[in-house]
Every structure is written in C-alpha cells, then in structure tokens.
Image (cartoon, rainbow, N blue to C red):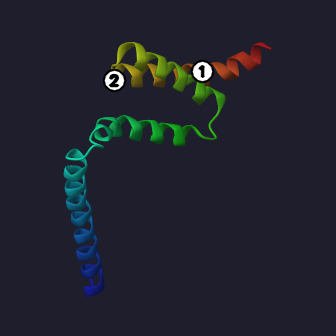
Amino acid sequence: MTLSHWMLILLLAIAAFSIRVLGLFAGDAIRASRFAWVLDDVPGLLVVALVASSLAGQSAVTWAAAAVALGVAYVTNHVILTMCVGGLTYAGLASAGPIWAALH
C-alpha cells in the first residue's frame, strides 16, 4: 500500500474516534440538561425511522408482514419472536400469492 492509502486510513480512524468522543461529550451534556428525557426515546425512534424508511416503496405483502410483526411486538414485547413471526408471515404471504392467483 502506498503512503496515500495509509494517510486515508489514519484520517478515517481519527474521524471515527472523534465522532465517538464527540458523542460521549454530547450525551453527557444532554444528560445533564433539561432534555435528558430525549435519550430514553432515542433507541426506539431510531428503529422506527429505519423500519419506516425501509418500508417505503415495498409491496403489500411486506406491509402486511410488517403489520403482523408490529402486532406481535406490541403484544409480546419479544424481539426474537417478533422477527420470527414477521419473517414467517412474509414467507407465507409471498408463497401464497402464486397459489391464490392460480385459484382465481
């Protein structure tokens, strides 16, 4: 590898470390402020944002499986069960589509 490759790696390592350190300081500052309640909701908000953006433009089968997974998550509050039921629902609906179309 050339010197430019090593310099890029070093620069990216410094940037990654700086982001983490800045996050620690920002988290401490928020934790000590009147906005500390926001930190409790951040993990859930991130998951909702990721799921919502990944559902945009998906098929009705995907939306139906997501709705079933949401129901399971709400009732059980169990992550692994939610993922399994959501995946099995998607697989079942996706495989039933051609069968349903052949019956009509």
Kind of element beneath mark 2: helix
- Image location of residue 69, percent across then percent down: 47, 22
* Cβ atoms at labels 2 and 1 below 8 Å apart: no
**Horizontal and vertical percent position of residue 82:** 40, 21
Q: Quadrant of the C terminus?
A: top right
Residue drawn at 28 percent across, 71 percent down: 12
Task: Kindly give the residue lying farthest to the right in the view shown.
Answer: 104
Residue type at the position of mark 1: Leu
- Mark 2–mark 1 distance (CA, rounded to whole Å): 20 Å
Q: Circle 2 is placed at which residue position?
A: 80
At x 34%, y 19%, the residue is 77
Circle 1 packing at 10 Å, graded few (<14), some (14-19), many (20+), is some
Nearest to the observer: residue 97 or residue 51: 51
Any mark on residue 93, and which? 1
Q: Viewer-proximal residue, 1 or 46? A: 46
Quarter of the image for residue 60 reads top right
Q: Quadrant of the N terminus?
A: bottom left
Residue plotted at (29% across, 41% down): 39
Question: Quadrant of the rendered structure where residue 17 is?
Answer: bottom left
User: Looking at numbered disc 2 in the image, what kind of residue is underneath it?
Assistant: Ile
Of mark 2 and mark 1, the one earlier in the sequence is: 2
104 is higher (above) or lower (below) than 1: above
Judged left or right of residue 22, residue 69 is: right
**Is residue 51 visible in the rendered structure shown here?**
yes
